[in-house]
Image (cartoon, grey):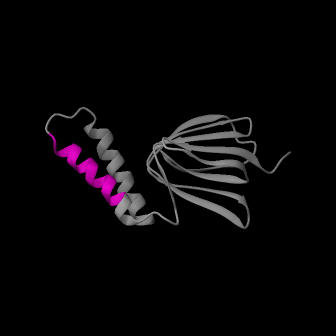
Amino acid sequence: MTNKFELNVISAESKVFQGEVENVLVPGMSGDFLVLPNHAPCISSIRPGFLEFAEDVSKKHRYFVSGGIIEVINNMVSVLVDSAIDGDNVIKEDISAIISEIDVKLSTGNIRNRDDLGLRKNDLEEALKQS
């Protein structure tokens, strides 16, 4: 039994990370969840928040992600996100700018995904508190 698994994190702009890790903490739609080696297969949506993973005890990574999906199959984890900002570089203004964009969309009269945008705004406001 191995104590690591393969992780690929890909954003719309680029490959963010590829390598072996010990764990991944994911901001899932129903709450954060931890992926460990030999995790059961799953697919889940990711809400805006912080994706954290460790290559080992001394090498940890933290990224702010604006949403996406995760797939876990046979110790292969793929995370596809809209965008990823290194946690050391994320500033509150980045998250606030995304919230402002949502506010502009919500202020328009006839919008189909008002509830989805409202939930996304709530998730971003929670991530803003964590940054």
- Tell me if 125 is positioned left or right of 68 in this view: left
In this rendering, position of residue 45 left or right of residue 71: left
- Residue 83 part of the magenta-drawn span: no
Is residue 85 or residue 64 the one in the foreground? 85
Classified by dominant secondary structure, the portion drawn in magenta counts as helix
Whole-percent x and y of residue 90? 45, 63
Residue 17 at what x, y percent from top left? Answer: 63, 49
Q: Residue at x 29, y 46 (%)?
A: 118
In percent of width and height, residue 20 lies at 74, 49
Determine the residue positioned at 68% across, 58% down.
54
Please state the total of marks drawn on the protein image. Answer: 0
Q: Is residue 68 above or below residue 57?
A: above
x then y, percent, for residue 71: 61, 36
**Magenta span:** 95-108
Task: Kindly indicate the quadrant of the structure image that contains residue 15.
Answer: top right
Q: Is residue 6 above or below residue 85?
A: above
Q: At x 74% / y 65%, what residue is drawn?
A: 57
Q: Is residue 56 left or right of residue 33?
A: right
